[in-house]
Amino acid sequence: MNVIIFGATGMVGQGVLRECLRDPGVGRVLCAGRHAASQHDPKLRNVVVADPGNLADVAADLAGLDACFFCLGVSAAGLSEEQYRRLTYDLTLGAARTLAALNPGMTFIYVSGTGTDSTERGRVMWARVKGATENALLKLPFKAAYMFRPGAIQPLHGVTSRTRLYRILYQTTAPLWPLLRRLFPDHVSTTERIGRAMIAAARIGAPQAILEPPDIEALARTTD
């Protein structure tokens, strides 16, 4: 299986990349984004693009892919709905449309978030925009598309957030994570479990298109 990862320098993306590099069933890993992934591996190649939503200049590198793990995203804090939509909906759909045209047999997996609003009419701005993005992705001519909506995520194996505030939060709450995992095993995940679940969805599929935290954990269990 040949895959492409968007947002491989973010927290979820780092976890997915780690699991792809460790999985013997993943042959080629292409990382696309504004920054190159820091890992080094014979099956890893970086494609640095100024605008991940416009892949015209690197289209020749994007054929022959079986799965896309789209982990790229920004916080809505401080942004207007127009700004957030441009960085979320427009960017994601720009990349997805190019990939769908080049790889009609691809499985596309989008990292959204718990609380996403599929009706696109709710009061929470980010949830509306994420819902619109999910709905548009599900209409594209991919072999399959899955919307991952993780909840709380524990970073493992040296994975860190690029956001300083989140790094501090994860460091100060680190002792609580094992307890939370035991108390809420279907709702508190890890970067490792999410990465394995995404690979499983690409490889064997999933029961439904929209996957909430318990569904993600159920997929991860298929790899245990």
Image (cartoon, grey):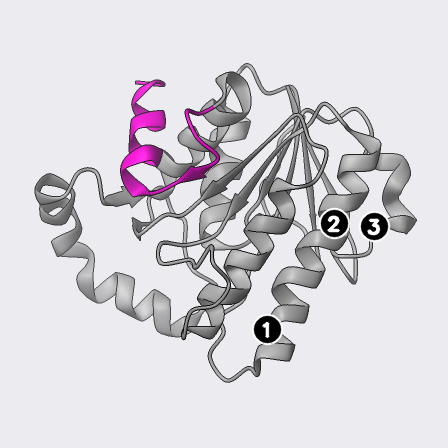
Quarter of the image with the N terminus is top right
Disc 1 element: helix
Type of amino acid at the residue the image marks with label 2: Ala
Total labels: the figure holds 3
Name which of mark 3 and mark 1 comes first in the sequence: 3
Left-right relation of 57 to 101 = right
The residue that label 1 is drawn on is: 84
Cα gap from disc 3 to disc 2, whole angstroms: 6 Å
Please tell me how crowded label 1 is: few (under 14), some (14-19), or many (20+) other residues with Cα within 10 Å. Answer: many
What segment is highlighted magenta in the picture?
A: 206-224
The residue under label 3 is 55
Q: Residue at x 53, y 29 (%)?
A: 20
Instruction: Provide the residue designation for mark 2.
Output: 95
Q: CB under 8 Å between callouts 3 and 2?
A: yes
Q: Could one spot residue 35 in this view of the protein?
A: no
- Residue at 30% across, 33% down: 217
Image quarter for residue 197? top left
Give, as a three-letter code, the residue at label 1.
Tyr
Disc on the earlier residue, 2 or 1: 1
Q: Amino acid at mark 3?
A: Leu
Residue 57 percent coordinates (x, y): 91, 50
User: Residue 111, image x and y in percent?
Assistant: 50, 48
Q: Position of residue 50 (x, y in %)?
A: 79, 62
What element does badge 2 sit on? Answer: helix
Q: Earlier in the sequence, mark 3 or mark 2?
A: 3
